[in-house]
């Protein structure tokens, strides 16, 4: 069977098989992505993130059902960056997702980290491309926790939804580094609990403060940074979009229509203002840059003998040579080889 | 005044000035690191991490005082990756650190992210090198939160201490992705609160499970990964070291002597087994690789006209070209230029 052709035709078994392949064997991703890439770029990708206990899975399930009512095909990628032996949440997700499984217009897939966050980010990105090429209209990426993984989903998603729940510790500290800045929509879930309005107010206040102080200092810092790595590229909120703060109770459906509507409005806003094209361009730039860096390291490893690399690194470890000079020497050595080969 | 020479002689004003310089202007770091690098490598670097509310700052203060009693010079770098407008914790740290300020054997510095996690990691690494060259025997890096920032400190630290406090939500989920794996010492702080023994037990259980299932699957995954980026390189726990789970009450000093002792024992263990040299070697390798990747991107930007880069990325964004092929073409184009130049 030609799994690529079958996936492109929307066959869920082929989609599942290709995603398993990229998850189990990173080396298979390039071939699959190359083959499917021309068919991608149609789906609207939504990242949904929030701390454990904020009710992400229920909310994602409810959201998927709402979109199904409007006849949209929905792909769900539930990403769990916990280590293998703390993977309880993952199993929980699978059980909860079961009530969606009868509907062929919904595809659900959980992905665990197996110890490498970078590997997880790559296999998630590849899974999204497979779903996109298979014709799913909306792709919901659900991530647990708060940290770099959430910043990473922002670069993979068109719309980022950040969840909170009332009474999850300090109102302010529960929103972690860079998370508020990447939100296109903020949601206080479990809004039937005490403290929901206060949590929503505090988020609105933080948003307001952020709009005043954030952008200028970010820009200044980036300007000073000679060679920012792609991960540093903080995505700015969409211009002309006022980040809404919504309250939901996913388990009863309260506020879910408003959330689905906000996502559709954000998608329309991105398209109407040309910002969707800009985000696609930025994502492509970051992806190509990542691949280039990896390609260069591969070529360098092939070009410079391991003995030379090991010796230079030992010089750095034993403080005979500083790391900048070592990098320069290795680079010069590699470029020489590129030259001789041609 | 020659600030480099003064810092090398241990002058705290020079140390403060150089750290401010690397924090404010990333471009100044290479010059400073090159000048000081030969004098680094003597300090023992301890990373201390845990969620907000686990009492990190009090614990770090107490720890610094213990080490001072043994006449060790202590540098503290308190890293706050929160965004600028949620920087309350940072100010709190500064206030709490004030009671250490009279002692010239202790140097305290808070560092905030200003919007770029990658930039923060780089300036923290440079600050550690400045303190190391200035003769501080122990350097304590304190980081808030749980996520990539914590994994990053592991590569900067010889000993990683992970803090928990009783009753911080789910016992299991409060230890985030990859955090348990990087811990050399686990601490349940605020151990006078209810649930402390249960939290310690649950950590011990997780450690035990981890030892059985962790390494094999990690290794398998890494093996399949053709070109792991440095961030993927999960540091394995020191062989022959049984990660202790300690209980402390930093505010009363309870258990603090045992913690200071565990850190000294871990340092001695690393040295005695040759693992300190291995960790230094790995850190040097990662640092050189990071610098090499940045250097390559700089050279590529100089070698390939912006119009060509922009056109290729637009081709990717508009799905005329897949990202792997774009990376290959850019790489070929850059290598050609390297060739012509020589």
Image: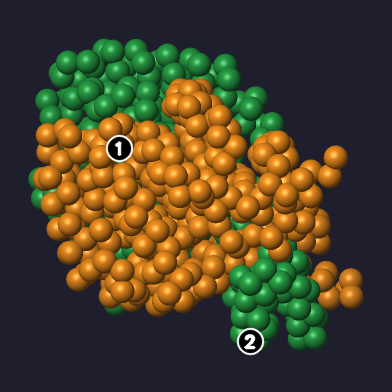
Chain colours: A orange, B green
Between tags 2 and 1, which lies in front?
A: 1
**B328 relative position to B294: left or right:** right
Q: Quadrant of the C terminus of chain B?
A: bottom right
With respect to residue B180, does A116 lie above or below? below
Mark on residue A253? 1
Q: Could one spot residue A158 in this view of the protein? A: yes
| Along the line of sight, the residue nearer the viewer: B177 or B245 | B177
Q: Kindly identify the residue that appears in the image at 55 percent across and 72 percent down.
A: A281
User: How far from the left and from the top, in percent, is residue B336?
Assistant: 79, 80
Tag 2 secondary structure: helix
Tag 1 secondary structure: loop
With respect to residue B340, does A48 lie above or below? above
**A295 relative position to A289: left or right:** right
Q: Chain of mark 1?
A: A
User: How far from the left and from the top, in percent, is residue B290?
Assistant: 57, 59
Q: Could one spot residue A22 in this view of the protein? A: no
| Along the line of sight, the residue nearer the viewer: B225 or A162 | A162
Mark on residue B307? 2
Q: Kindly identify the residue that appears in the image at 66 percent across and 50 percent down.
A: A134
User: How packed is label 2: few (under 14 Cα within 10 Å), some, or many (20 or more)?
Assistant: few
Q: Chain of mark 2?
A: B
- The quadrant in which residue B195 appears is top left
Discs 2, 1: same chain: no
Q: Mark 2 to mark 1: distance in Å?
A: 50 Å
Q: Kindly identify the residue that appears in the image at 12 percent across and 34 percent down.
A: A194
- The quadrant in which residue B118 appears is bottom left
| Along the line of sight, the residue nearer the viewer: A261 or A114 | A261
| Along the line of sight, the residue nearer the viewer: A181 or B123 | A181
User: How packed is label 1: few (under 14 Cα within 10 Å), some, or many (20 or more)?
Assistant: some
User: How far from the left and from the top, in percent, is residue A142?
Assistant: 45, 42
């Amino acid at each position: 069977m030609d799994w690529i052709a079958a996936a492109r035709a929307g066959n869920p078994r082929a989609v599942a098989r290709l995603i398993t392949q990229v998850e189990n064997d990173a080396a298979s991703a390039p071939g699959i992505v190359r083959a499917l890439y021309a068919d991608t770029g149609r789906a609207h990708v939504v990242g949904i993130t929030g701390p454990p206990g904020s009710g992400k899975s229920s909310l994602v399930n409810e959201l998927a059902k709402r979109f199904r009512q409007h006849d949209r095909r929905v792909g769900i990628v539930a990403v769990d960056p916990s280590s293998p032996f703390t993977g309880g949440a993952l199993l929980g997700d699978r059980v909860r997702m079961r009530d969606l499984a009868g509907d062929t217009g919904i595809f659900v897939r959980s992905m665990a980290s197996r110890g490498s966050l970078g590997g997880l980010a790559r296999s998630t990105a590849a899974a999204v491309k497979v779903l996109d090429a298979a014709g799913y209209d909306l792709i919901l990426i659900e991530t647990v926790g708060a940290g770099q993984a959430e910043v990473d989903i922002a670069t993979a998603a068109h719309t980022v939804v950040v969840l909170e729940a009332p009474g999850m510790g300090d109102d302010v500290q529960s929103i972690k580094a860079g998370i508020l800045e990447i939100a296109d929509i903020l949601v206080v879930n479990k809004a039937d609990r005490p403290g929901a309005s206060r949590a929503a107010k505090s988020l609105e206040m933080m948003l307001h403060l952020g709009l005043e102080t954030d952008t200028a200092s970010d820009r200044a810092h980036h300007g000073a940074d000679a060679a920012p790595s792609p991960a540093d590229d903080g995505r700015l909120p969409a211009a002309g979009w006022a980040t809404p703060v919504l309250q939901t109770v996913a388990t009863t459906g309260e506020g879910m229509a408003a959330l689905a509507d906000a996502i559709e409005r954000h998608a329309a806003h991105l398209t109407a203002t040309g910002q969707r094209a800009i985000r696609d361009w930025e994502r492509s730039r970051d992806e190509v840059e990542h691949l280039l860096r990896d390609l260069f390291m591969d070529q360098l490893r092939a070009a410079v003998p391991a003995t030379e690399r090991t010796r230079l690194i030992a010089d750095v470890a034993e403080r005979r040579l500083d790391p900048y000079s070592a990098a320069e020497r290795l680079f010069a050595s590699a470029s020489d080889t590129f030259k001789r080969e041609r």
